[in-house]
Amino acid sequence: MLKDQTAIVTGASRGIGREIATKLAEQGMKLTIVGSSSQISETANELKKMGYTNILPVQADVSKEEDMEEVVRKTIATYGSVNLLVNNAGVGFFKLTEEVTLEEWKKVFEVNVQGVFLATKAVLPHMKERKSGTIITISSDVARYTIPNGAAYTATKYAVQGFSGSVAQEVRDYGIRVGTINPGMVDTYFAESTQGLPEKKDWLKVEDIANAVVYMASAPNHMLIDEIVLHPFAQQYPIA
């Protein structure tokens, strides 16, 4: 279903993004992987060593419009099309609201919301012209309920959910599908944590999120999967 199609994956240097890129490459997709540091080239080399040759690494800042426009231009110049955009790049921190600095507030919104907007905006003209495409944003279960000490992060995920829903309505007549994947606790590097800690043994794994992306992206053309919410069985959470 996805073989020989092209995907852009942001935040692909490590963690969930790297695993999404790997799973899509396993499906036979051609990839542009985007990261904010030179580590993205290391990730590309690792994927190529695994036998996946159609990997284009691009170091870019998702919060900058010119960077995301260049990502799309390079992808089309290299592969000829963009079939799938995975908005995965994200940052988060958790502290009392009065301890949040304005710089921290701006940073989390620039990456988590502005980055999703700019990447989506950059691919839409191409997808509209082709009358096909899929846009998947990795959001969070806190797009459905609130948590203490996470006002800034939670606010960004509510914003992303609203943004994705509106875009989905705008582009449905062009055959473009838009959806979100909202995971609970995932064993990754998020929020300066360490992957593989013993206390995370029952959390979701990065491959769980990557498999959800493959499932959503592989849906037949007559099917739209608006949202996937997944949690580790051990997680207690409010029912929205």
Image (cartoon, rainbow, N blue to C red):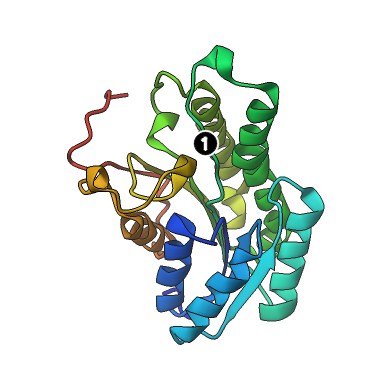
Identify whether 86 is placed above or below 83: above
- Apparent side of residue 182 relative to residue 47 in the rendered image (left or right): left
Residue nearest the viewer, comparing 181 with 13: 13
- Residue under the point 49% across and 16% down: 96
Q: Where does residue 58 sit, x and y in percent of width and height?
A: 68, 67
Q: Where does residue 22 sit, x and y in percent of width and height?
A: 43, 71
- Residue under the point 64% across and 33% down: 109
Label 1: which residue?
92
**Badge 1: residue crowd in 10 Å (few <14, some 14–19, many ≥20):** some
Q: Where does residue 85 sit, x and y in percent of width and height?
A: 57, 59
Residue type at mark 1? Gly
Residue nearest the viewer, comparing 79 with 37: 37
- Residue under the point 56% across and 55% down: 11
- Apparent side of residue 149 relative to residue 61 in the rendered image (left or right): left
Identify whether 232 is placed above or below 146: below
Identify whether 223 is placed above or below 99: below
Residue nearest the viewer, comparing 72 with 39: 39
Q: Where does residue 221 sit, x and y in percent of width and height?
A: 45, 63
**Is residue 150 visible to the viewer in this orientation of the structure?**
yes
Assign the C terminus to one quadrant of the image: top left
Residue, far top: 98
- Residue under the point 72% across and 63% down: 71
